[in-house]
Amino acid sequence: MSAPLWTGEKLIAALRARPEGAVPPVVTGASIDTRTLEPGDVFFAITGEARDGHDFVRGALDKGAALAVVDEAHAAQFEGAGALAIVPDVLKGMEHAGTARRAELKAGIVAVTGSVGKTGTKEALRLVLSRQGKTHAPVASYNNHWGVPLTLVRTPADIAYGVYEIGMNSPGEILPLARMVRPQVAIVTTIQPVHLAAFASLEGIAEEKAGVYWELEEGGTAIVNADIPQSELLRDIARSGPAGRIVTFGESPDADVKLVSCALKPDMSVVEARVLGEPVTYRLGSPGKHIVLNSLAVLAAVHALGADLALAALALGDLKPPAGRGARQVLQAPGGRVTLLDESYNGNPASMRAAIENLGRLPVEGRGRRIAVLGDMLELGPTGPELHRGLAEPLVSNGIDKVFTCGPLMKGLHESLPSAMRGAYAATASDLEPLVLDAIRGGDTVTVKGSLGTRMGPIVKAILARFPAVPAED
């Protein structure tokens, strides 16, 4: 059995709940999904966009949940089914419990937000800090109104470091999440035209993201990207809050954590940097200039926490792209190998350009081609059509041979491309899938990318199903 995460009595108190049934002596995990629930977990019956968690309470208890958190309106229907924690509102109860767990932590806490690069930076911090002490960070991109409190509830009380990702889709979302996390170190990776449908300008996005600086612990460290136009705005906001220190990172000459040089290679980078005057050279196991720049923010956070900088730099050599965010596989196709880069988790103008640049650096075998399979970038507001057409320039300049596109916005890009580069266009990802499968041949290098809502992931799965993986030792 897993080590206790909570005692039952302590969790009931933290939830501000009234118990019904036998309170379990311990709870070993926390879940909102019966498909992944483990025996001993507390199950939170939160209401999502499509489903009400109360529909799954009996299944959770039958599967071995130690406790189910339900609201007053549904409590009577579960009488006698098992141990219950009854609250006015399940999500609010989870927030109370997460805040209570945060209050007892004696760990170094980092919060990461930004338009792009949040999850990769969070995973890099998890990697480097876990080499130096017990570290907790969210699984996947648990960065929203339920993901942050759930991650806090799941945090063991004895960690040395905690890393929390904070996201948003609309105004007013960052502050309450950051208030729960209450970091000692806060990173805003960058500001880019993402969620422009909900904001009037990039400055508005910057102001929202900078809310994470307002919720720093007194005297904490605000880490700011020195290279973006909104850098001074972010610094001004950080100065007006509780931050005791502002640390900048980037290529700018005045950056506190400065990129001196980097050698960008298809599967890694070699980086030379200066971290508050200290020279650091390291190998970065995940490719791309954007990853290099975010690694500077990681080292800035390590320094701010007082952790071992040299050990962190060494650990970055083991960094690998998360699933759906650049994970690479080599496959066998008729006539040779195919390299597949899975960037299907999300797409926005900044990450799309980074993926295109990375594809342009990758080698092809024989007569192979560099192929981009691109789906719509969502939530860009009225600038969406222009931002999609604008991808033609980096596709041409990075030597991409064929571009397959899907979605109403990508139609503008398809029409903007030179005719020789047009692979195929389809209205949906499912319509595009067979066209991509038929086009791939030995020697090709293929990147698949688009916003999650465009469902590019199934194209990746179809490619993997069609072409077997080359064994690692081959």
Image (tube, helix red, strand yellow):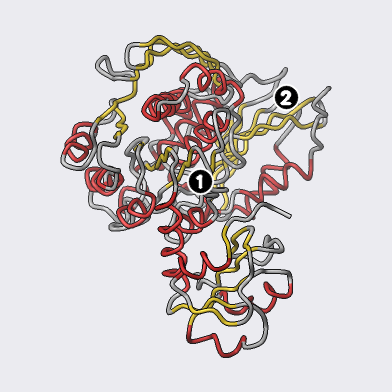
Q: Residue 110 is drawn in which quadrant?
A: top left
Horizontal arrangement in the rendering, residue 250 relative to residue 38 (left or right): left
Q: Residue 243 is drawn in which quadrant?
A: top left
Is residue 398 visible in the rendered structure shown here? yes
Q: Which of marks 2 and 1 is nearer the N terminus?
A: 1
Q: Residue at x 48, y 54 (%)?
A: 152
Q: Name the residue under label 2.
A: 443
- What quarter of the picture does the C terminus occupy? top right
Whether tag 2 and tag 1 are in contact, CB under 8 A, the answer is no
Is residue 420 visible in the rendered structure shown here? no
Q: Residue at x 74, y 31 (%)?
A: 441
* Amino acid type for the residue under numbered disc 1: Asn
For the residue labelled by badge 2, is the local secondary structure a helix, a strand or a loop? loop
Q: Which of 269 and 437 is in front in this view?
A: 269
Q: Which residue is drawn at 54% across and 76% down?
A: 85
8 over 291 or under it: above or below: below
Q: Which of 179 and 345 is in front in this view?
A: 179
Q: Which of 112 and 307 is in front in this view?
A: 307
Q: Mark 1 points at which residue?
A: 346
- What quarter of the picture does the N terminus occupy? bottom right
Circle 1 Cα neighbour tier, 10 Å, few/some/many (<14 / 14–19 / ≥20): many
Horizontal arrangement in the rendering, residue 268 relative to residue 470 (left or right): left
* Amino acid type for the residue under numbered disc 2: Gly
125 over 202 or under it: above or below: above
Between tags 2 and 1, which lies in front?
1
